[in-house]
Image (spheres, grey):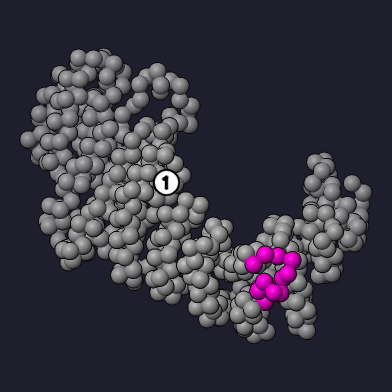
């Protein structure tokens, strides 16, 4: 590649872009030149020339990216009397690219977002309402009404996201955020107007959900729009946008201020407890991505609002069954059929919840009452883990890749930790349960040595529990130690698990 001596002309930039995309050997040199060009004062001019519709795609993309870079990082270069012309040209370019290419349009949305962030406190306080007026079908005759609406929604979505990543002086952050929040009603009403139309196209609804989720980042006021929350739950049942709706609801549940809105969270839980058929259908269709998202929402709500769940069980008896059904879904997640990590990866999501729940129970002033309520849940969880712990048949395990074996090893260790959480709640009942399983597993392995996996899982579980058992426990540990003489030591993993259990108990 020839030395262009920092001559930042359109021709030189286009030539360098060609080298960057098509000549590996000169890519580093080309990149260096392009970065210099992008940070040069001339960039304010050549960016527009590169954005011309007749230019190559690479040039258009670089032009749009350059505008974003200049507005976001070198705003101080621009005289204040240039703000208006820059805004108008950005808007005109967005109109031009409303029909695509999508990537160029997105870069222009980001550039316009940066412009709004820089000017909304003084030069352009009415930015959002002005843009809503501008993005009307009659103003962009070359695009369909749906395309126009999608661009406006994307711009509003990107605006909130860009604010989160823009480096502003600390004193300006709060001022800009408050200016954006003043338009929250306008934005949420737009989102609601789309989602409430049963005839609205899927891509427009998806963009609306993303906008709702994005604006939640600006503050807790978005949590006040309960009608939008209901529309988001309705969207979960629409296959084309279900994933986006679940991600949106998860973001709402994760909101730092959500704990200050317990009524809203309980409404979310009430809607979640209607997921029976949806979970069943998703599982039967083996749609693991969607199943992960469904359980992800449920678990996020559970982890973030565990104390609310317990307070509701104690203080609102009419909602007790609802909470237990909700937690039952998380138990269902932990019990997901199939071999981890080959057949399923859903079950690993729930480990954090069980720690949070047992910790919240044991530290609650209504500890004794909660123990009685949640005893069956943790018994069922322990039973589920004795299944999930098991190795697959040896001929199957031998075919696993090394990373799959390592994932399973870590998964078993996480189960080991969770079994200790079960013990913290169940105490001697956990030992009684494990002994009952151990007796059955020992008989099974004695009758058929190839069926050793159940026994190994029981020994593993006993080893994990033994670390927490009181040294004075004299009801089940002696029985367990005495039972060890009955263990059929015919497989290396049984021998290893037995020795580890003995070692822990001796210590």
Q: Residue at x 90, y 56 (%)?
A: 12
Quarter of the image with the C terminus in it: top left
Q: Name above or below for residue 17 compared with residue 451.
A: below
Residue 493 figure quarter: top left
**What residue is pinned by disc 1?**
292
Residue 456 image offset from top left, x and y in percent? 26, 26
Q: Residue at x 16, y 25 (%)?
A: 440
Q: Is residue 416 visible?
A: yes
Q: Residue at x 29, y 65 (%)?
A: 266
Residue 355 image offset from top left, x and y in percent? 29, 50
Relative depth, front residue between 242 and 296: 242
Q: In the rendered view, does 342 fall on the left or right side of 24?
A: left
Relative depth, front residue between 315 and 506: 315
Residue 380 image offset from top left, x and y in percent? 21, 41
Residue 158 image offset from top left, x and y in percent? 60, 65
Q: Is residue 209 highlighted in magenta?
A: no
Q: Is residue 247 visible?
A: no
What's the magenta region? 134-145
Label 1 sits on a secondary structure element that is helix
Q: Residue at x 44, y 41 (%)?
A: 287
Q: In the rendered view, does 337 fall on the left or right side of 250?
A: left
Residue 394 figure quarter: top left
């Amino acid at each position: 590649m020839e030395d262009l001596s920092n001559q930042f002309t359109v021709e030189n930039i286009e030539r360098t872009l060609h080298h960057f995309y098509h000549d590996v050997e000169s890519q580093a040199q080309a990149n260096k030149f392009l970065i210099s060009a992008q940070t040069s004062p001339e960039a304010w001019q050549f960016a527009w020339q590169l954005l011309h519709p007749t230019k190559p795609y690479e040039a258009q993309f670089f032009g749009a990216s350059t505008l974003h870079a200049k507005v976001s990082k070198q705003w101080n270069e621009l005289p204040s009397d240039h703000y208006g012309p820059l805004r108008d040209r950005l808007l005109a370019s967005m109109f031009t690219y409303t029909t695509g290419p999508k990537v160029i349009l997105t870069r222009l949305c980001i550039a316009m977002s940066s412009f709004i962030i820089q000017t909304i406190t003084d030069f352009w306080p009415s930015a959002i309402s002005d843009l809503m007026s501008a993005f009307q079908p009659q103003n962009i005759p070359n695009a369909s009404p749906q395309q126009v609406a999608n661009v406006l929604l994307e711009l509003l979505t990107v605006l909130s996201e860009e604010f989160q990543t823009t480096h502003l002086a600390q004193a300006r952050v709060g001022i800009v955020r408050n200016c954006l929040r003043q338009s929250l009603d306008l934005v949420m009403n737009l989102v609601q107007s789309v989602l409430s139309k049963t005839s609205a196209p899927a891509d427009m609804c998806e963009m609306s959900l993303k906008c709702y989720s994005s604006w939640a980042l600006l503050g807790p006021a978005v949590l006040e729009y309960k009608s939008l929350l209901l529309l988001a739950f309705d969207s979960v049942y629409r296959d084309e946008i279900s994933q986006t709706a679940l991600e949106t609801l998860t973001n709402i549940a994760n909101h730092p201020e959500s704990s200050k809105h317990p009524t809203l969270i309980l409404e979310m839980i009430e809607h979640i407890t209607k997921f029976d058929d949806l979970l069943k259908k998703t599982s039967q269709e083996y749609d693991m991505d969607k199943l992960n998202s469904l359980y992800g929402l449920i678990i996020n709500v559970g982890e973030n609002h565990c104390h609310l769940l317990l307070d509701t069980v104690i203080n609102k008896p009419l909602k007790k069954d609802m909470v237990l059904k909700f937690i039952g879904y998380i138990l269902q997640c932990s019990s997901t059929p199939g071999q981890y990590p080959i057949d399923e990866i859903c079950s690993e999501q729930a480990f954090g919840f069980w720690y949070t729940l047992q910790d919240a129970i044991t530290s609650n002033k209504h500890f004794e009452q909660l123990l009685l309520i949640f005893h069956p849940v943790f018994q069922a969880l322990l039973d589920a883990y004795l299944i999930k712990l098991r190795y697959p048949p040896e001929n199957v395990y031998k075919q696993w890749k090394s990373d799959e074996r390592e994932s399973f090893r870590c998964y078993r260790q996480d189960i080991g930790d969770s079994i200790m959480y079960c013990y913290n709640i169940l105490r001697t009942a956990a030992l009684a349960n494990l002994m009952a399983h151990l007796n059955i597993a020992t008989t099974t392995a004695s009758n058929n040595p190839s069926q050793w996996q159940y026994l190994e899982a029981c020994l593993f579980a006993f080893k994990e529990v033994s670390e927490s058992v009181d040294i004075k426990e004299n009801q089940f540990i002696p029985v367990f130690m005495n039972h060890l003489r009955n263990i059929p030591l015919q497989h290396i993993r049984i021998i290893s698990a037995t020795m580890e259990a003995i070692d822990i108990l001796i210590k």
